[in-house]
Amino acid sequence: MYVRKRIKEACSNERGDISILSCFLIMGVVIIISFLLLYASVRINCINIRNGVKMELNNLSGTIYADTFRSQRESNFSEYLNTLYSSSDYMDMLEETVTNGLASKVPLSTDDYRIQNISLSFQVVGGRVEYTFQCDAEFYIYMFGHSYPAITQRIQLTGYHNTKFM
């Protein structure tokens, strides 16, 4: 009888009792906060990557300026455009310059993200050379001892360099 009474008291003791509704409410708040932190982390990293790309596009504009100035001085701008469109080596060199410059400012791969599919394209519109930088930033979450891809964000920036045709 005494043992039965002690078991009944232990089972009906209301100290520390938490309802199932409270458990789900706490778990829901934790999940919402986790998603908000992931969203903020992705936004901050995208801003950092974009800022690094902007600096490199400014450097690219300087490189294009030096090349087009030399071509314009020689009255041979069409030759520069032929080089730009027909020479994959020249375009690869410009893309590699931007990629290496970006890597020196922002790591291309961390535990949180990886930048991949970097491309640089050019076109002449009116009196200017327009260039478009594109890349994919794949963001990861770390769970249960493994990294899982969570979000892939496309980053695209366009810049231009004004030229004067002779």
Image (tube, rainbow, N blue to C red):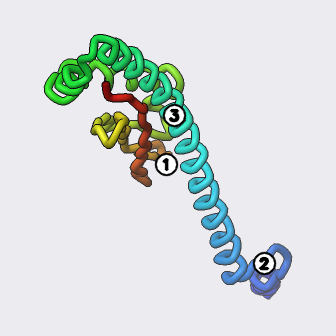
Residue 90 x, y percent position in the rendering: 23, 19
Kind of residue sitting beneath label 3:
Lys
- Point out the residue furthest to the left here: 86
Coordinates of residue 138 in the picture (x, y in percent): 40, 45
Q: CA distance from mark 2 to mark 1?
A: 34 Å
Q: Nearer the viewer, residue 11 or 127?
A: 127
Q: In the image, what residue type sits under mark 1?
A: Ile
Q: Is residue 30 above or below residue 104?
A: below
Closer to the camera: disc 2 or disc 1?
A: 1
Q: Residues within 10 Å of mark 3 (few under 14, many from 20)?
A: some
Amino acid type at mark 2: Asp
Residue where numbered disc 3 is placed: 54
Q: Earlier in the sequence, mark 3 or mark 2?
A: 2
How many residues crowd around disc 2 within 10 Å: few (fewer than 14), some, or many (20 or more)? few
Give residue 141's mark: 1
The quadrant of the image that shows the N terminus is: bottom right
- Helix, strand or loop at label 1? It is strand
Q: Secondary structure at mark 3?
A: helix
Residue drawn at point x = 72 percent, y = 82 percent: 19
Q: CA distance from mark 3 to mark 1?
A: 27 Å
| Residue at the spot 61% in from the left edge and 65% down from the top edge | 31
Q: Is residue 25 above or below residue 125?
A: below
User: Quick check: 1 left or right of 128?
Assistant: right
Q: Residue at horizontal 40%, vertical 15%?
A: 66
Could you say which disc has been placed on residue 11 in the image?
Answer: none
Say if residue 107 shows up in the picture.
no
Q: Which residue is mark 2?
A: 17
